[in-house]
Image (cartoon, grey):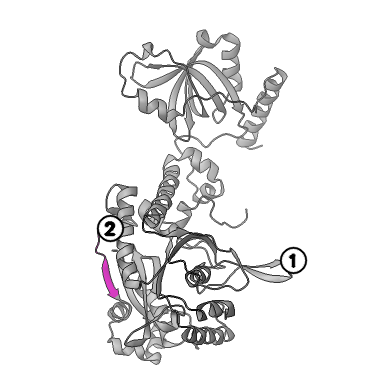
Amino acid sequence: MSVEEKIKEERLKKLKELEERGINPYPSKVKRTHIISEIIEKYSPVKEGLENVKEEFFIAGRMISRRSFGKACFFHIMDFSGKIQCFIQLPDVGGENYTLFSKNIDIGDILEVGGTLFRTKTGELTLRVMSFKLLSKSLRPLPEKWHGLRDTELRYRQRYLDLIMNRDVVNIFIKRNKIVSFIKDFLKSRGFVEVETPVMHPIPGGARAKPFITHHNALDIPLYLRIAPELYLKRLLVGGFERVYEFARCFRNEGISTVHNPEFTMLEFYIAYADYEYLISLTEELISSLAEVVNGGKRTRFRNNEISLEPPFQKKRFHELLSERLGADEKLLNDKEFLTKKCQEHGIAIKGFEEKGALQFLLFEKLVEDTLISPTFVLDYPVEVSPLAKRKEGSPELVERFEFFIGGIEIANAFTELNDPRDQRERFLAQLKEKERGDEEAHPLDEDFLRAIEFGMPPAAGEGIGIDRLTMVLCGVDSVREVLLFPLLKPE
């Protein structure tokens, strides 16, 4: 029998003893007058005269430590807002209650505690316990205090333990909540309307990705979990909405890495009568303001890099960066044979039917992206890899698109939206040919979307921001799993 199993067995015995004494170890009623942070904030500055505070405070939370001294015991109670030291002694609660506390209450149990405040000889604000009540008996031991949870995979599998033991982890998710709240306020203050669009799509679209497939029994049709909300949000532009946004749960049937999880959160927003240059200035304002609010300054430390988030951010052309990295003249980027050779040299798997724009993009992903540490807008992508973006005037082989990078990872993707239904149909048909050649991520033909924009979609710009990756950067953590409460893992 393992140590944990032995502890569980002992605690089950304690549980039975409590029930035999008529004590419900999982009661419903709780008397709670304060959260712990309220007490700390109000009374930490009070250095003298706490004995004159006659109020009795009732708190509720988990016991996370204890030190016993015969007929007295110090312990800490933690709720979501913080922790406080408590002191219990036999004269205050009586012999029967003190014996019950000593023998039947364990670290990890959730308690209601009532008492008054005082300071110990070391000056620590402490609750003198006059009464206590068991609210939930813990049957398994918490990890040892000083070692905590060091197994990274165990931390993700048992996130509940990670949250109990690691306040820094809790703070990441509090910060994530701040990020989302700030972005919503930022967009609403600029006239954007928050909307909700379907998660199950009859036709997957809006991004190059392999979808998850399910089946609707009543209609007897296949459905696809959303890979992006883009095509539905554009339908709203057709319908007369001019500024819309959605925090969308998206699903892509792809591998797992430090920057990929098959289920993720994407912010997408669209604005009529604007282009991608407008989105550059909006993104600069959003990111810098967000850093100020969340981090208290326009800097972050990410992957051992001190990064300034003070605008204006660097702006580079796609082909300029790629030619610099390859050490080749930009004209050579139009040579498919040259691009194919470079892909082979750098170990990039290709299928042989890729157009030059796709080869350029593969090389860019491999050679350039992780070098973009400072905030950088990469402008004007090949049309072959941007089937929903408007062509750049004077350069029809390019589109008005940018990707935004911080710390070597893509944070955002945006473009001036293609609203010419004739060009859009041609792009979809080209994508169908790619799909027939074996490209599982190519866009299918969406006739209803084409019908919608044939009614007239205003000139517009749209942007998608990966909230998980943005949170990584602002929190300074290396893996997307650190900012997902329950990342996808292999089954145990």
Q: CA distance from mark 2 to mark 1?
A: 50 Å
- Tell me where residue 461 appears, x and y as whole percent: 39, 71
Q: Nearer the viewer, residue 5 or 63?
A: 63
Determine the secondary structure under disc 2. loop
Element type at marker 1?
loop
Task: Tell me which residue sits at (27%, 87%) in the image.
Answer: 329
Look at the picture and state if 196 lies above or below 161: below
Residue 269: x, y in percent? 43, 64
Q: Residue at x 39, y 14 (%)?
A: 53
Horizontal side, residue 274 vs residue 106: left or right? left
Q: Quadrant of the N terminus?
A: top right
Q: Earlier in the sequence, mark 2 or mark 1?
A: 1
- Label 1 sits on residue: 217
Figure check: 303 above or below 118: below
Instruction: Give the x, y percent position of residue 165.
Output: 48, 38
Q: Is residue 13 above or below residue 392?
A: above
- Bounds of the magenta segment: 308-316
Quadrant of the image occupied by residue 419: bottom left
The mark total stands at: 2
Q: Quadrant of residue 127?
A: top left
Asked whether residue 82 is in view, the answer is yes
What residue did someone put label 2 on?
309
Residue 377 placement, left or right of 5:
left
Could you tell me which residue is drawn at 40 percent across and 73 percent down? 460
Which amino acid does the dot numbered 1 rest on? Asn
- Type of residue at label 2? Leu
Single out the mark in the foreground, 2 or 1. 1
Residue 444 picture location, percent across and down: 57, 79
Q: State the residue in front, 438 or 197.
A: 197
Residue 346 appears in the picture as rendered: no
